[in-house]
Amino acid sequence: MGLDDQRSWIVTTEANSFFWPGYDLRGISQTDSGPYAFGVLSVDLFEKTKRQFLANCRRLVDRELE
């Protein structure tokens, strides 16, 4: 993904809604108009993140229904 050696986090307890691509989206290169992505998640990491996000959503809905 092009990350440095510092620790990074994926927040699965928050979600944002926005239009894609947004007006503030800028390419990686200052001289080239694209691409916008630095890299991709592995399938395993994506699936783990998705499962955790959906579990957090279910907990939030369950709590609101109490």
Image (cartoon, rainbow, N blue to C red):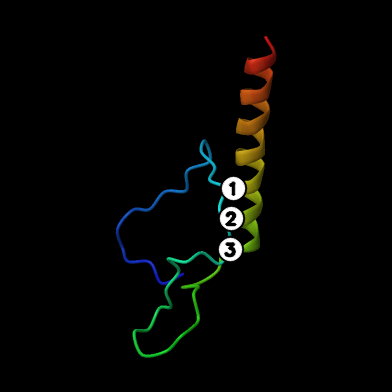
Which residue type does callout 3 highlight?
A: Trp
Mark 3 lies on a secondary structure that is loop
The residue that appears at 55% across and 53% down in the rendered structure is 18
The residue that appears at 66% across and 38% down in the rendered structure is 54
User: Where, quadrant-wise, is the C terminus in this rendering?
Assistant: top right
Which residue type does callout 2 highlight?
A: Leu
Residue bearing mark 2: 45
Residue 11: percent from the left, percent from the top? 47, 43
- The residue closer to the viewer here, 41 or 64, is 64
Alpha carbon separation for disc pair 3 and 2: 22 Å
Residue bearing mark 3: 20
Determine whether 31 is above or below 52 in the image: below
Determine whether 37 is above or below 8 in the image: below
Left or right: 7, with 24 as reference point: left
Q: Which mark is residue 23?
A: none
- The residue closer to the viewer here, 15 or 4, is 15
* Total labels drawn: 3
Q: Earlier in the sequence, mark 3 or mark 2?
A: 3
- The image quarter containing residue 27 is bottom left
For the residues bearing labels 1 and 2, Cβ distance under 8 angstroms: yes
Residue bearing mark 1: 49
The residue that appears at 64% across and 57% down in the rendered structure is 44
Alpha carbon separation for disc pair 1 and 2: 6 Å
Q: Earlier in the sequence, mark 1 or mark 3?
A: 3
Which residue type does callout 1 highlight?
A: Thr
Alpha carbon separation for disc pair 1 and 3: 20 Å
- The residue closer to the viewer here, 57 or 26, is 26
Residue 48: percent from the left, percent from the top? 62, 48
Rate crowding at label 1 as few (under 14), some (14 to 19) or many (20 or more) other CA atoms within 10 Å: some
